[in-house]
């Protein structure tokens, strides 16, 4: 039975290995969970990056052998989401005025791609979840070790140990924060400007119980 | 003596910096690819890179670790993709609008990650970053 003490999950299946470099102040509230892939080949390379002072990172890391590391407190904010898509634009649910605003930010002349998409993301942050996608301020991130492959246009298949550990961890977090799997757990590539396939296999496994 | 140490240190620093960039790259093919599944794909209309600009990209963008690329990258729904030679070997590559690029090995795994993040890099292109 897992318990949470001072933002750390106390459970023999989860190893606390906290890194100050990826914690950036207190998190407002936890409304959602974002599933990531590391793009690296080992947990060690991610942990070494954190130890070297890397600022970006997520609350958890699941190694190839299924070991779960808690790398940041549940009470702290991590920079794991990046630049958000507009949720209503993706879901075709924006009212006409809002869609016009988003399009004007996205196509604003004289600004670089990065500036324009950052402006859209900033605009999204003015909305409350779930009107927008999860942000750093209100979501927990889970990194699962795995590289991207261009030939298959997806990330390498997580190991069975990773799938099993992910389910265990997500079940603990859903219960702890009263979240629902179908509404509050997201693949990173769907919500932010990253590789589209990032986290998709993980979410599919959690939702249908079958490893892709 | 001190002068020699400073000179050696400077030479070492310059050499170390040079290793973060790719100098011996030749672009063989390039094709613009746009992900039209995104409603916003029109944003890609003015994303144009010539083969010499793609070469310049790999010479000026900073080579970063998998972890840094993962954290810092911005992936827009458009890219230039193709083949290049590096040290006489052929590889495939992608350069995304927003300034992130990759070189892949024969099996499709990422070999090198690049991000155009400095003003020096971004200002070398009319519409990359």
Image (spheres, coloured by chain):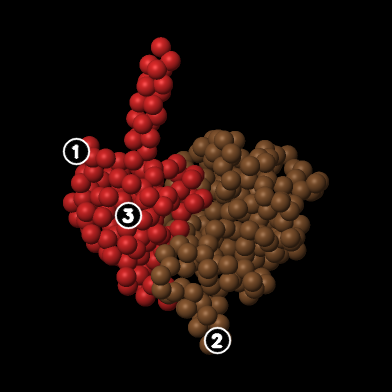
Chain colours: A brown, B red
Tell me the distance, in whole angstroms, between the alpha carbons under discs 2 and 1. 54 Å
* Residue drawn at (68%, 53%) of the image: A77
Q: Helix, strand or loop at disc 3?
A: loop
Q: Where does the image place residue B56, in percent across and percent down from the top left?
A: 27, 50
* Label 3–label 1 contact, CB within 8 A: no
In screen coordinates, is A132 left or right of B48? right
Query: Mark 3 or 1, which is nearer the eye?
Result: 3
In screen coordinates, is A164 left or right of A138? left
| Above/below status of B71 relative to A194 | above
Q: In which quarter of the view is residue B112 placed?
A: top left
* Residue drawn at (81%, 46%) of the image: A5
- Dot 3: chain letter: B
In the picture as drawn, the residue positioned furthest to the top comes out as B1
Residue denoted by label 3: B124
Query: Mark 2 or 3, which is nearer the eye?
Result: 3
- Dot 2: chain letter: A
Same chain for mark 2 and mark 1? The answer is no
- Please tell me the numbered disc located at residue B88: 1
Q: Where does the image place residue A35, in percent across and percent down from the top left?
A: 57, 56
* Residue drawn at (75%, 43%) of the image: A11
């Amino acid at each position: 039975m897992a318990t949470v003490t001072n933002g750390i999950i106390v459970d023999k299946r989860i190893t606390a290995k906290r890194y100050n470099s990826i914690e950036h102040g207190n998190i407002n509230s936890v409304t959602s969970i974002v599933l990531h892939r590391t793009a690296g080949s080992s947990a060690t390379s991610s942990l070494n990056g954190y130890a070297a002072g890397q600022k970006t990172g997520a609350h958890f890391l699941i190694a190839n052998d299924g070991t779960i590391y808690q790398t940041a407190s549940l009470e702290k904010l991590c920079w794991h989401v990046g630049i958000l898509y507009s949720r209503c634009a993706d879901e075709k649910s924006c009212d006409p005025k809002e869609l016009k605003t988003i399009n004007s930010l996205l196509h604003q002349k004289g600004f670089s791609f990065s500036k324009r998409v950052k402006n859209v993301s900033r605009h999204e942050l003015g909305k409350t979840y779930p009107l927008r996608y999860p942000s750093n301020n209100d979501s927990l991130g889970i990194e699962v070790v795995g590289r991207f492959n261009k030939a298959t246009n997806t990330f390498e298949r997580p190991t069975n140990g990773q799938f099993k550990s992910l389910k265990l961890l997500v079940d603990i977090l859903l219960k702890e924060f009263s979240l629902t799997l179908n509404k509050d757990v997201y693949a990173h590539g769907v919500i932010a400007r990253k590789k589209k396939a990032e986290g998709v296999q993980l979410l599919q496994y959690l939702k249908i119980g079958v490893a892709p | 003596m001190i002068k020699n140490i400073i000179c050696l240190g400077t030479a070492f620093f310059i050499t170390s910096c040079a290793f973060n960039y790719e100098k011996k790259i030749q672009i063989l093919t390039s094709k613009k690819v746009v992900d039209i599944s995104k409603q916003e794909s029109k944003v890609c209309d003015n994303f144009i890179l010539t083969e010499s600009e793609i070469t310049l990209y790999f010479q000026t963008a900073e080579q970063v670790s998998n972890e840094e690329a993962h954290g810092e990258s911005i992936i827009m729904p458009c890219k230039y993709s193709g083949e290049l030679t590096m040290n006489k070997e052929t590889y495939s590559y992608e350069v995304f609008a927003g300034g992130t690029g990759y070189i892949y090995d024969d099996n499709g795994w990422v070999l090198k990650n690049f991000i155009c993040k400095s003003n020096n890099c971004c200002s070398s292109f009319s519409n990359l970053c």
